[in-house]
Image (cartoon, helix red, strand yellow):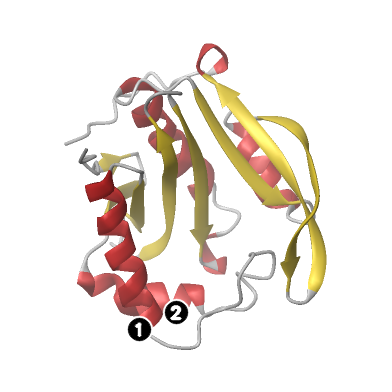
Amino acid sequence: MTLVTPILHTARLRLRPFTDADADPLFALQSNAHVLRYWDSPPWTERERAEQFIARCRAMETEGTGARLAVDRVCDGAFIGWCTLNSWNPDFRSASLGYCYNDAAWGHGYATEAAHALLQWAFGTLDLNRVQAETDTRNVASARVLEKIGFVREGTLREDCIVNGEVSDSWVFGLIRREWRPSTAPIPAR
């Protein structure tokens, strides 16, 4: 089953499918050790990883398992990161949310705004009942993003990752459809 990756718009952002032209800014993002300090994999060292990532984005869509979207600022068209809805299970009507933004974009509400748009699509178009997200317990800023958009912290996965050689715990967050508070502003999808 093919999942059509949407193009979503917010007041300040455009969420869109990745293109080959995104390889350089994507590599810059994913090779930044500061950005990935809580990530469950090391920063990239080879640009080819960006091309492989973009190919996997297309495969996710074709396989119907998710959508990973590049996020651009509307005011200048700059690529600032990406967000994803993956592990989509149409039978259970569930999926997982994730995101990664360059450090210059932190603290401006972009992650919250983009995730909210993606959730509107998830609950509206895909008719999901549950969306889950995980974050390293040291990543308090990411936890705040999830809580701002309605996620509830449901538990802790103890020592589930090794981040930069350090054993790490993750918080599990969940958002169910009946608790979702959609925006009143329409977000068009293709």
| Residue contact between numbered discs 2 and 1, judged by CB atoms under 8 Å | no
Residue found 53% across the figure and 41% down from its top: 112
Residue 101 in the image, given as x and y percentages of width and height: 51, 61
Which of the pair 185/122 is nearer the observer? Answer: 122
- Residue of label 1: 48
Q: The residue tagged with tag 2: helix, strand or loop?
A: helix
Which of the pair 36/182 is nearer the observer? Answer: 36
Tag nearer the camera, 2 or 1: 1
Question: Which residue is situated farthest in the bottom direction here?
Answer: 46
Quadrant the N terminus occupies: top left
Q: Is residue 124 visible?
A: yes
Residue 81 in the image, given as x and y percentages of width and height: 43, 61
Give the amino acid type for the residue marked by disc 1 in the picture: Glu
Q: Earlier in the sequence, mark 2 or mark 1?
A: 2
Residue found 70% across the figure and 39% down from its top: 172
Residue 165 falls in which quadrant of the image? bottom right
Label 1: how many Cα within 10 Å (few below 14, some 14–19, many 20+): few
Is residue 25 shown above or below 85?
Answer: below
Q: How many marks?
A: 2
Residue 107 falls in which quadrant of the image? bottom right
- Residue of label 2: 28
Quadrant the C terminus occupies: top left
- The CA span between labels 2 and 1 is 12 Å
Q: Would you say 36 lies left or right of 155 here?
A: left
Give the amino acid type for the residue marked by disc 2 in the picture: Ala
Residue 29 in the image, given as x and y percentages of width and height: 47, 73
